Each structure stands twice: as structure tokens, then as C-alpha cells.
Amino acid sequence: MKHLIDKLEATHVLSKQEFISLIDGRTRPLSEYLFDKARRLRKKYYGNDVYLRGLIEFTNYCKNDCLYCGIRRSNRSVSRYRLSKEEILSCCAEGYSLGFRTFVLQGGEDGYYSDEMLANIIREIKALYPDCALTLSIGERSRESYQALFDAGADRYLLRHETANPGHYRMLHPPSLSLERRKQCLADLKEIGYQVGSGFMVGSPGQTSEHLAEDLLYLYELQPHMVGIGPFIPHHATPFAKEPAGTAELTLFLIGLIRLMLPAALIPATTALGTVDPMGREKGILAGANVVMPNLSPKAVRDKYMLYDNKICTGDEAAECRHCIDRRISSIGYRIVVARGDYKEMGREKTGS
């Protein structure tokens, strides 16, 4: 199997069957072989630097009813909230003082926030913090909406495709959502000029090695600047409540593959990875990741933004999260840097702004 990892390192892509063979045939020694190559490649582009993204979860209202998500529309037990512009700006102020130079505005698909309202918030953040990048993670919108938010100053956009297999996509989502529409949104975002992030859940109900191979091939085709993957974790108030969680082991293996496939990608060691394994984020960095996303949301709303059960760090203040992640990353020989942490292409940074 090592020859397939060598081939991926050299050519940055494999056939669907080769990816399936690697995923199904993975062993601990093979994983270590992969992670060593992934670390070397990540170091070539980013050294030992790990970038911070300050996550501001500003609304847990969502019009969608995705079967895996804790804030799905039909979950009546959720205590819903929306942050005001002033509350969002307060999160940014605290984050900036703690060394964050990227803010991520994340929320459900909430029609309350019009393009005009969001553009106003974006312009104010960029005026106050011109040395910072602003990332949006607010779901599917029209191309015109994406353009308006980009024109207001947004730099990056995160939109996971979740699964690249149409049948599997239908299993995870309501009929109102389609894989074709999701892919069109991602294409629109790239064409407009955003730094674009996509990704998928690992171990979601019904997922096969073939699906994962299709996910990898779609990412190779898309060539995103960022790739976020994390284990599926069930939420008790969803139709998938009784389904088993995805594993850290498979998630880490896939991070390593993605690093070899997309050498310059910005890849987070996700909160979900830290939820299924107490050392998950550290292991993610050692598998090839180079981004961490501590939470800057007000402490009072953290436990209301529960996409899955047992999410870590919901009771910590922002400063506690910042110092904790600093210690964790330092303990494995890497360093958190105060920087925007832009995508690097051919040795040059693409600022996206």
C-alpha cells in the first residue's frame, strides 16, 4: 500500500479504486508512513505555524432540516438565539486582543440576516480590523448574495459539500436540498474570488469507502483553498440519534490523504475531532492539519449551538480557549501564530481580499 501513498505524493491524485484500496487497507504502520509525508509537505508550505480562526456562532436559527444536525428546523427543543451587530463586534474586539486575525461568522441559514444587514456587519468589521480576514459560513445563498457579501469585504467562505455521492446526499438531507445546488454554490464562490473551503463528515450514516473516494476526487476537482473534515457525531434530537459516531482514526487518515492531494490547503483540526478523542486536535496537526478554530462566541450562547452532542469547550471563556489551545499546540512542537493565515500558492500568499 505504501506505493499508493508514494504515488499520491508524486501526482496528487489517485483513481477511485486506488483511494478505496488505501482506505480499506489502512493499518497503523501505513498511517504513520502517510502522516510523516503529510507533515513534511505541510512544513514545506507553512513551516511549524498553526493558524487561529476565531469562531463566532451568531445564529442557531436554520430553515433547513438536515437529518444529522442538532439545530435542524424541526428540533423544537433548541433554545434559539441571534447575536446583534454589537454583540458580534464585541466578540471580534475580544478576539483581536487575544491574537486572532481571522474571524469566522458561522450560523444556520437564517433569513433574518439580509444581505444588507450582513454587508453592514462585514464592512464594520473590516473597517475596525483591516489586518484581519473575514470568513463566512452561512450556507447556500444566491450568486448575487455571495457577490454582495464579497464586495462588502468578506474574504473566505466555508461550505462543506458533506458527501459527493448524490444518493448518499439525499439520505442525509431533506428533498429541498440537492448536491447539484451545493456544487453550484461552491463553483459560484470560487468564480467570485473567495478563498473557498469545503469538506465532509467522516462516518456519517450510510457512508462507504466508495463515497469517501468520491469525496476525495471531488475535492481534487474543486481545488478548494480550505478543507474541513470531522467525524460524524450523533445529536440526540435528530433521526440519526442512535447511529454510531465516526472515528478519529479514519478522520486522521483522510486528513493525511488530503494534505498529499492538496499540498497547500488550509486544513483545520476540528472541534469534532477533539470531541471524539481528547487529543484529537493535536493528532490532527500531526496528521497534516494546520488550522485550529477556538470559539469566540459569547459564553451564554455556546451550549445553544449544538450541531452534535458533547461538543467540547462550550463552558470556557474565549481567553481560556486561546491559552489552552496554545499550550496544546506547543506541546507537540508547533506554534500558534498571530497572522491572517492565507492560502499559499506557488510560494505566494493569496489574500483573497
Image (tube, grey):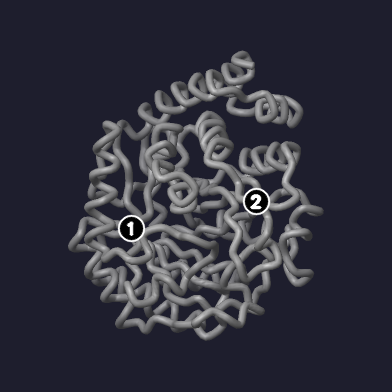
Give residue 175's position: percent from left, percent from top: 79, 69
Nearer to us in this view, 165 or 74 = 74
Residue at 75% in and 63% down: 178
- Going by the picture, which residue comes out furthest to the right? 167
Q: Are marks 1 and 2 in contact (CB under 8 Å)?
A: no
- Going by the picture, which residue comes out furthest to the front? 242
Give residue 325's position: percent from left, percent from top: 29, 49
Query: The residue tagged with tag 2: helix, strand or loop?
Result: loop
Which numbered disc covers residue 244? 2
- Going by the picture, which residue comes out furthest to the top? 3
Which amino acid type is shown beneath numbered disc 2? Pro
Quadrant where the C terminus is found in the figure:
bottom left
> Is residue 207 positioned above or below 43 on the image?
below
Nearer to us in this view, 161 or 342 = 161
Residue at 22% in and 63% down: 96
Which amino acid type is shown beneath numbered disc 1? Thr
Residue matched to label 1? 102
Query: The residue tagged with tag 1: helix, strand or loop?
Result: strand
- Going by the picture, which residue comes out furthest to the left? 97
Label 1 and label 2: CA atoms lie apart by 34 Å
Nearer to us in this view, 57 or 105 = 57
Give residue 316's position: percent from left, percent from top: 30, 64
Label 1 packing within 10 angstroms: few (<14), some (14-19), many (20+): many
